[in-house]
Image: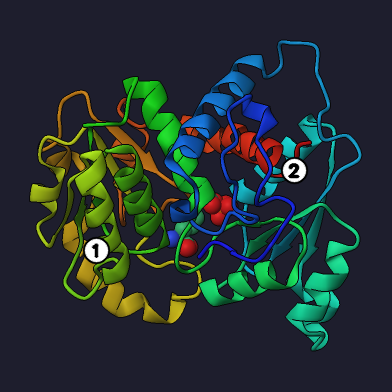
Amino acid sequence: MASTRPSKRNSRSTSALGSKTLLLPKDLLTVADIPRKKVEGLISLAKKLKAAHGKDKPVFPLKGKTLGLIFEKPSTRTRVSFEAGMNQLGGQALFLASEKIQLSRGESLADTAKVLSRYVDALVVRTFDQSALEEWAQHTSIPVINGLTDHCHPCQALADLLTIVEKKRRAKGLKLAYIGDGNNITHSLLEIGAKVGMHVSVGCPAGYEPDSTIVRQAKAEGIHTGAKIEITHDPLLAAKNADAIYTDVWISMGQEDQQQPRMAAFAPYQVNSQLMKQAKKTAIVLHCLPAHRGEEITAEVLDGPQSVVLDQAENRLHIQKAILLEWLGK
Ligand code: CP
Ligand code: NVA
């Protein structure tokens, strides 16, 4: 939920895009918090940053700024893309593994958040409960960016949207099929699809559906943007005529003790060449990574010609640079 408390960032215009004043929430906690125009602005800024990457004379708009990264779970892409992105924009990133700071010895989240607000300009937080992320946001005077929770992964969904727009020239009116667990990735995809008018069809086993509140809100928003939101237990139906097929691991971080029931429930939900026959011939294949070949997706599909997963991973860098400019820039 977006912070409603007064913040100097709540009322400022967003110069990085040169757009008219658009309210920017203090924190980036969910896709739902970001106004649609701002999502479009982030995509357009990320495209510009990507085109300029490694070409133009570098400019350092975040010189002197420091980004803290508090991670309570492992990460390759999120950590490295934020650290590299901050570096490319002239700022610095500080990785703060939660077990290496006094949090692990009982210092409160509130005290840690207030102290860090005196040192750094923004925080990326990867944690378990969305409520813990909201607590970070509540106790900081600086922006807090969601680096993944059990509930959602907004930076990932923004990179996914950038990838779809790059590959397909648009997102509105396309069909994205998500096959597998109704998890954090699914939630952010539903939110972003609903926001930009992209149909999202989720094919998942009974008992593993996405959060019903998110589904209800996505359906309600979809009425205005044209996005059709569908939840089905039939993976082939979900994949039918899709422009993009997306999957994620069957066992997310923190669910390792549920291995046995999950492997059994998800076995019919593998993205393989049979399932791909349901999608359009031109469909692209997305996966947030890390992937487990032979489980949620076959090696043949993940490493095949329709897969765009490496571009998708690269796009984490470009979209997050856009996010950093929006939330930390002058
Ligand atoms: N997709 C993603 O967030 O990857 P990491 O867990 O490696 O950051
Ligand atoms: N659903 C996965 C996403 C990893 C990027 C997890 O939470 O582990």
The x, y position of residue 33, in whole percent, is 49, 54
- In the rendered view of the protein, which quadrant contains the C terminus? top right
| Whether the residue under disc 1 has CB within 8 Å of ligand 2 | no
The residue positioned 54% from the left and 33% from the top of the image is 42
Question: Of the residues shown, which amino acid type is indicated by label 2?
Answer: Leu
Q: Please tell me which residue is depicted at 60% across the width and 31% down the height of the picture.
A: 318
As drawn, 100 above or below 324: below
Q: Is residue 193 visible?
A: yes
Q: Residue at x 80, y 11 (%)?
A: 57
Quarter holding residue 29: bottom right
Depth order, front residue of 8/178 = 8
Q: How is the image coloured?
A: rainbow
Query: Seen in the image, is 288 located left or right of residue 54?
Result: left
* Residue type of the residue flagged with mark 1: Arg
The answer to whether 157 is drawn above or below residue 117 in the figure is above
Please identify the quarter of the rendering in which residue 251 is found.
bottom left
Q: Residues within 10 Å of mark 2 (few under 14, many from 20)?
A: some
Q: Position of residue 18 (x, y in %)?
A: 63, 24
From the viewer's perspective, tell me whether residue 165 is left or right of residue 20.
left
Left or right: 129 with respect to 283? Answer: right
Residue corresponding to mark 2? 328
Nearer the N terminus, badge 2 or badge 1? 1
Query: Which residue is at the front of the view, 318 or 36?
Result: 36
User: At 21% from the left edge and 63% from the top edge, which residue is drawn?
Assistant: 267
Decide which of 181, 11 is in the foreground and name it.
11
Farthest-out residue, top: 56
301 versus 58 height, above or below: below
* Residue 191 point in image, percent of width and height: 36, 52
Q: Which residue is most to the bottom?
A: 106
Residue under circle 1? 216
Q: Secondary structure at mark 2?
A: helix
